[in-house]
Amino acid sequence: MPRLNPDNIELAKEILGRYPRPKSALIPLLHLAQEQDGWVTDDAMEHLAELVGCTPAEVLGTCSFYEMFKREPVGPYLVNICHGISCHLLGADELLEHAEQSLGVKTGGTTADGKITLEEAECQAACTEAPCLQVNYRYRYKVANEAFDQLITDLRAGKLDDEIPPHGTLARRATRQHIPADRAAGPAAVDVNVEPVWLSRNADASEAKG
Amino acid sequence: MTDTAPARDEVSTVTVTVNGTAIEAAKGELVIDAAERNGVYIPRFCYHHRMKPVGMCRMCLVEIDTGRGPALQPSCMIECTDGMSVETESPVSKKAQDGVLEFLLVNHPLDCPVCDKGGECPLQDQTMSYGPGESRFIEEKRHLEKPIPISQTVFLDRERCILCDRCTRFAKDVAGDPFIHFQDRGNDSQVNTFPDHPFASYFSGNTVQICPVGALTAKPFRFKARPWDLDQVESTCTSCSVGCRVVIDSSRDEVLRYSGVDSDPVNWSWLCDKGRFDFEYVNDDGRLTEPLLRTDAGQDLAPAKWSYALKTAATAIKGGLDRSGPAGVGIIGGARLANEDAYAWAKLAKGVIGTDNVDAQLDDGLPAAFVLGLPRATIDEVCAPGGTVVVYAPDIKEELPVLFLRLRHAAVEDGVKIIELAATDTGLTPLADSSLRVRPGEAADVVAALFGSGTAPEGVDPTAFFHARTLLAGGARVTAVIGRPSLAESADVAVAAAHRLLELVPSVTFLPALRRANVFGALDMGLAPGILPGRVTLDEGRAHVASGWSLATKELPTETGLDTRGILEAAANGKLDTLVLLGADPLADFPDRDLAERALTGVRTLIAVDLFLNESNRKADIVLPAAGYATTEGTTTNLEGRVTTLGQKITAPGTARADWIIAADLAGHLGGDLGVESVAQLQDEISRVAPSHAGLAAALADPANRDGVVVPVPAGPPQPPEHAVEGNPADPSHRGAAEGAPAEPVLLADGEVPGERLEHELGPDPAPATVTLPAPPSVAAPVRDAYAHRLVVTRKLYDHGTLVQHSPAIAALAAPSSPLRLNPADLDRLGIASGDRVRVTSERGSLAIDVVADSGVPKNVAALVLDQAGGAAGQLLTAGSLVTDIRVETQS
Amino acid sequence: MTITDAPKIVTGRLAAHDDAHTIARYEATDGYKGLRAALQRAPQSITDEVKAASLLGRGGAGFPAGVKWGFCPPGVFPRYLVVNGDESEPGTYKDRILMESDPHQLIEGILIACYAIGCSQAFLYCRGEMALAHERLGEALNEAYAAGYVGKNILGTDYSIDIVLHWGAGAYIVGEETALIESLEGNRGMPRLKPPFFPAAKGVYLQPTVVNNVETLANLPWLMQHGAEAFHALGAENSRGTRMFAVSGHVKKPGVYEVEFGVTTFRDLLYAPIYSGGIRGDRALKAFIPGGASAPLFYEEHLDLPLEAGVVGKAGSMLGSGAIVVMDETTDMVKATRNLVRFFARESCGKCTPCREGTTWLERILDRIIDGHGRPEDIDLLLDVCDNISPGLLWPPKQTTICPLGQSATPSIVGTIKRFPEEYERYVNAPFSTTVAINGAAYLSPPVAAATGGSAE
Ligand SMILES: Cc1cc2nc3c(=O)[nH]c(=O)nc-3n(C[C@H](O)[C@H](O)[C@H](O)COP(=O)(O)O)c2cc1C
Ligand code: SF4
Ligand code: FES
């Protein structure tokens, strides 16, 4: 069942605990579901609806708004070729054409071996490195056609697996934020109108000083 | 809440210039509304004045200048401020509006000729007034699968959708059922449900009504008629006692659609799907079209002529009178009838036949005198910002759905605090500020404890309890919704709880939550033991009513008669000669099925007046077809006591007659004369004879009273409240005085006769005082033995009742059967799994039933839905017991 | 040339060190000194200092940060800080660098801002597609918590705050501050209407909320250490301190350069050897975008304008997000325009009719023109559709929509039709004359009318 597995339920609870309102955790939890299954399944969305306290229709409403969430399976490597204006000026269209030919798929498609899904993407904030692309959101700069082909060969051979985790993993576990319980200030409850302690106390102190 | 009260008082006005004309607007009023009030209509699609504005269609863009030069602003989002200048027709405003319209049409299919909305479509209308109509868009339009069902009753055509967010906002903000939502983004945006999760909302049909194009259509109306072929009449929905105002659309003598009317005090244009879609029963082929008679016992019912059927009925009644006297006749039912029908039947029963064994309720409500004597509140009073509402009632979402919407708005938007006392979770629970789980039988004690200083009563969650206590101690105005939360609990429990609340908060007013269509009108008209028309008791009102009916006092019953339970018991014991079922189905609706069965067998003659055959009236000797909703005129009364008109739109099936005509005909055959010839004449007579309804006919005729008149009718013209109806000191009867004031002075009396009273309006005699609250019953719930579960029996919106089942669009929404629900912990304790079949035994009977876990049911309680198809509940309940305990055992 | 030796306020550390993202390097290079300084002071005095420094927001709108902080209604708590790290405006590349390469500087900036404003929680909203930034920020936050810089009782004081790293998921519009807030609440990122939803008054959960850009906040540690005076000493007019500009497109040395704000000119940035070094192949400049895809195009005659917000605004465009995209003479302006318009059409949230339908319609007309099916009347149609989205075709633009996205699709169309009519004529195979009036400064020719300070050579 592609609901969240027990480990991820634990993590989901930790994430939920950071927000004043549970629905705020929805996008991070959708990422978690996508990390688990490689895409966001209907079952996962129903599970998230339970976790954040809304209807599945609302979860789908959010999920479907955002480009990164895939509601159908994609290959373990999602190759996004940037077609933003800077990349456009420096050959993005040509790179894309080359990619379609060499992979034998149109944008949006997945290669016959199921490994690679090709997409066009809007500006990736690497404009000075045009044309650029991302594989599972890891950058490749100034990509020439040959470099693209080499990249695909390496991906298929699993040579880049250390650098590029499978689709869905945005941050590896060790690098995720983890707020230790003894250090947490805690989420700021919405309906408790109290002024933060330091705001006035320091003012007093400075008045005293002045 | 204390800080909102003064703010409401300082309503200030501002001056705004609209197209060069200065107008007054309330501070905070939206520009679009202020302009419309002053005759300037600004086009719109997303804005709907019963919902929060979103400002996203951009159709209402106008130039607004607040001193910094004109700027295009959505008039549905901008509040009026003093000195603001608005140009709705300036070149820039027009350009923007025309641009938006063209953009909307870019992807709209323009399939108006085959669209249900064609002819009443805002998009079409505005396109017509926009001009050329030649689109400059030459690319291929968006294509999506044509109408997809999003629920059992509603279809969605996404090609036509203009993404105005009305349906989705309604679903989330008004109904609280966000099962439809925007999906995808930008130009690919669409409204849809989650796969395999239909738009299962009791209120889904409203989205069809508010859709500004033909994207949402209702299954029962699709392709039925073109809007310009429709005839319309305003009426009131009689599916429950909320009394939502509707428009009935018909074509070629067939009802085709109900739509909600924006009645400010009542339904705000909303309807529930049961009310909206049960019109199908009106046209149903199964309607009774001619009288039916059983000539010999054991024979089938066979068609008969009216004259013969009426004569047979009269003969039977007369025979019974001869044998057993008036007390040998009983009449059950009448809550389906219009006020005028109910009045005629009350007059027939009490004035002609002379029996007081009359009851419009089936032991599923509250005692008539209690209901009539309660200090009443209106829906607006209950929902007024800043108040606290105590609820001890049936599940309001299931039984009075649009009242639920009003309460939802009050709680979510206006900060009204709801304190719910309920045996299990209900549809209202998520909205309640504090929801207390009260064990059956113990409500009055919990009410007392809420005002005491002690600890929380056993079984009541202390946090919720103390929160409720704090709320009640806060000094906010308190109103209450009181009803019969469970058919397994005697009405006495609710009555005692209400009394306790009144003792502790003397200013409290009540909205009684009885659900049957016109049960309040029936009680007002005297279809209850011990009650005469006009909310007077038999004893107090005898002289007044007798003289109004031109009878001698002694011709009216001398003693208070039996209620439904008493009538059925008498029938079961062979003590009742003739039983009339006036649109009643005791086998399905009376909580104690065994007693109902014995009664129907035990009675000598069973006469039924109804729209359809049902389980009970199939056993009748004489069945008379009634005309019913949409085929007759009259008035109906909602739970506030608001009297509104019913519209006649089509002719009755076959030879079916209005209920009042049947009463008059029967009276004639019995040698009496009701002296009524028309609905109008009945209304006049009611205004004259029924003390609480004095002046009603004139008030209803006043066009200012489109939303109906709350009885007792306030006296007018402008008078201070204390001059209004008196008689029941507990009754705050000046409600609505301001807008409901009739043009002609209508005076009502409490015994004394002011000099200038008009004979015509007063009736022949001084009017008696209306019913006062009877003394509280004493209730002490028996101790539940440790192995038993205390039973709760409730109803659902969609049931197996006649009207729902004869409305195909909603019939299938009734659950096929209802399992017993127990707390998961109890299931564990009993070693039973959810889904198992168990044996359940009460004092009354024993049966096998499926059980499911439900954490909304507290421990030691068992919950069941009254299943009208002869389900379990009726077999377990004993009429009259205070509570019902059951044992649950594994089937071995 | 006005190349200055202004300090690198936000990029100094990362330019000098490969490991600037580690806490060790950060602490070794004055890290968290600004926070320590701030904690010695009254919060209000920090807001005042930021006001005095004239630190303009670096996210696009260029609103003074200190003034914005002051808009939170008094007495209403909790207040939240939302860090806008959604960087998605085409051509923009600066916040990602700061998040990936110097995350502690941003964290320190957040801590200073929250302390000054009185925020009870901060959300760092990082664009979804920036996986490395998620990792670097996650690690940096974990280190900072462990070291006592973030969380409960920061550095032993009564100041406590959590910074929650929040990941976006791909939607440009979420960079708009009210959409960012919707998104942070778990909803579709659709902007809210202002009024009534000004974030400072009604933001996250309808509580007072300050939304600041990553680069804006990254200035604070330096500002706390060196003071408003030192900051204000750099730059001109309201544009003070330094600013990061990403120069991309047809230049020899594309790159992200932190330069003195307000005085450095476009010519410096595009041609100076230490910056972009001129147009590739020494070709002629055809046009450049001075501030992200939403900004109207500038041309040769604008090169000597200083990078000063007011000046650029008067000249008919904006510095926006600090993204300069350079197009040389070989550029097909119709295709470049289609590229820009397509971006806005695809990134429209879908809420407003003119944006949802209008931008897509524009894209499809341009597609048709480029595919060889254009008609002369399409040019008028393009302009009139633009006019229906942004009435009058003015600068600053009027908009029929809730947020400026819809209207942002129009300047490139209007500008290129005005400036390069022959390119459109070539596509539609016929000359055209337009009947739609174009009024705005950006679209006037020659468009330097209102510019000051610039002199051609
Ligand atoms: C369509 C649109 C997209 C935007 N995208 C971003 C963005 O990616 N990053 C950003 O910081 N600001 C963006 N902004 C500006 C923000 O709305 C907001 O002004 C800014 O985050 C405030 O921070 P600042 O005052 O520190 O600049 C965008 C605005 C609009 C209208
Ligand atoms: S202008 Fe476009 S992106 Fe902005 S709110 Fe409207 S539809 Fe959404
Ligand atoms: S009616 Fe005002 S924007 Fe839609």
Image: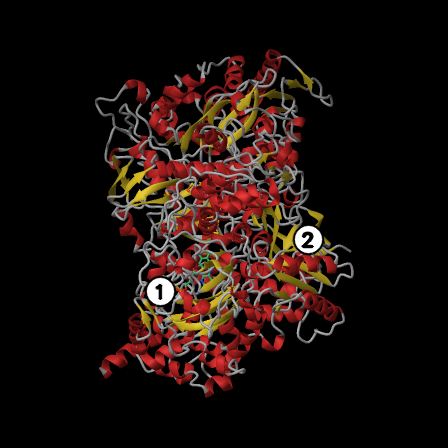
Label 2 sits on residue:
B851
Is B574 or A128 nearer to us in this picture? Answer: A128
* Amino acid type, mark 2: Val
Q: Position of residue C426 (x, y in %)?
A: 55, 44
Please tell me whether residue A55 is drawn above or below residue B482 in the rendered image.
below
Q: Quadrant of the C terminus of chain B?
A: bottom right
Q: Position of residue B493 (x, y in %)?
A: 49, 48
Is B688 or B855 nearer to us in this picture? Answer: B855
Q: Quadrant of the N terminus of chain B?
A: bottom left
Q: Of the numbered discs in the image, which one, if any, rests on residue C308? A: 1
Is B396 or C28 nearer to us in this picture? Answer: C28
Count of number-bearing discs: 2
Q: Which chain letter goes with mark 2?
A: B
SS for callout 1: loop
Q: For the view shown, which residue lies furthest in the bottom direction? A: C28
* Amino acid type, mark 1: Glu
Q: Which chain letter goes with mark 1?
A: C
SS for callout 2: strand
Q: Circle 2: is it few (<14), some (14-19), or many (20+) Cα within 10 Å? A: many
CA distance for labels 2 and 1 = 74 Å
Residue B465, image quadrant:
bottom left
